[in-house]
Image (cartoon, grey):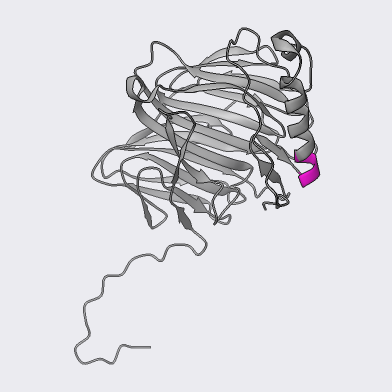
Amino acid sequence: MSNLDDEPAELTCAATPPVGVEVLGPREVPLGGPRAMTVRRTLPSRERSLIGAWCFVDHYGPDPVSETGGMKVAPHPHTGLATVSWLFTGEIEHRDSAGHHAMVRPGEVNLMTAGRGISHSEVSTAATSTLHGAQLWVALPDDARFCDPAFEHYAPSEIALPGGTARVFLGSLLGQTSPVATATPLLGAELLLDPDARITLDVDDAYEHGVLVDAGAVTVAGHDATRADLVYLPPGSTSLDLHAGAEPVRLLLLGGPPFGEAIVMWWNFIGRTHEEVVDFRERWQAQIDGAGREAVLGEGHFGVPIGDGLPPIPAPTMPQVRLRERR
């Protein structure tokens, strides 16, 4: 059909963004204490609880450690999830009750699988002047959530791109596959884009994807995003278009097939029912309320990292209402 207007107005035509794309803004959450390091949390949010199995996204820094006090997270428990630590600058010391002691450094991924139960601590090192990175959680599926705790470390090599670079720390992208094993298919990669770079990535159309912007401004599949925004993209696309703004861009690309299970997430626990989470909390409290530090270092359900002098963190009081499922 023709436009029959005698003097048609000039129109700027652009591709329509795919239906279902969401730009999730962050909310600020203090980690605790009078000089608390503040993180920017985009997942879970009111709009969305999961992207694939990714269920928690915290972005922090760059923070001057001399002013914020850095990261000093005492031993605390986890169940039913895996933590993924990725740094841009700084260094964090990790200790867990399964006996793993490792450093988190820029460009190197640490994946800790909590499984049936683990506790760990995270403390920025004395050599760290600026702390900057992301802390991510992955929900474990029902058939893996009571597995034994585990830990993996991997330093991916840099991939050169026209207009940028990439490091693939989980899953497969750009012809590179991470050796880190995960309970569900996952994608995790860091991309650095030059100013005004345009990149199209081949992606799995069965995956949901999330783009976490660390620095700069970028257009993701037709949607504009800036620092700490998380862009959600539904399954169905075999490619992902990225267009950097006038400044260099750093982002994390996360992905995985829709999780397909409802979860109950509270504090540091992921379960399937309210009662299950209550039980996890009671087990942790019983352990840390034991007679003295030596009792805490015993087997227990979660254990406590050996060599860590910080007192374990008590669990908060349970809310007065039943915990609701997240899907």
Q: Is residue 227 above or below residue 220?
A: above
Q: Position of residue 215 (x, y in %)?
A: 33, 38
Residue 79, quarter of picture? top right
Please indicate whether residue 19 sits to the left or right of residue 293 in the image.
Answer: left
Residue 310, quarter of picture? top right
Foreground residue among 129 and 171? 129
Is 276 in the magenta? yes
Residue 125, quarter of picture? top left
Tell me the residue at 55%/55% (across/down).
46
Read off the magenta span.
272-277
Q: Position of residue 99 (x, y in %)?
A: 68, 11
Tell me the residue at 31%/70% (across/down).
13
The answer to whether one can see residue 180 in this image is no
Extreme residue in the left direction: 7
Dominant secondary structure of the magenta stretch? helix
Tell me the residue at 33%/66% (across/down).
14
Foreground residue among 232 and 102? 102
Q: Position of residue 290 (x, y in %)?
A: 76, 17
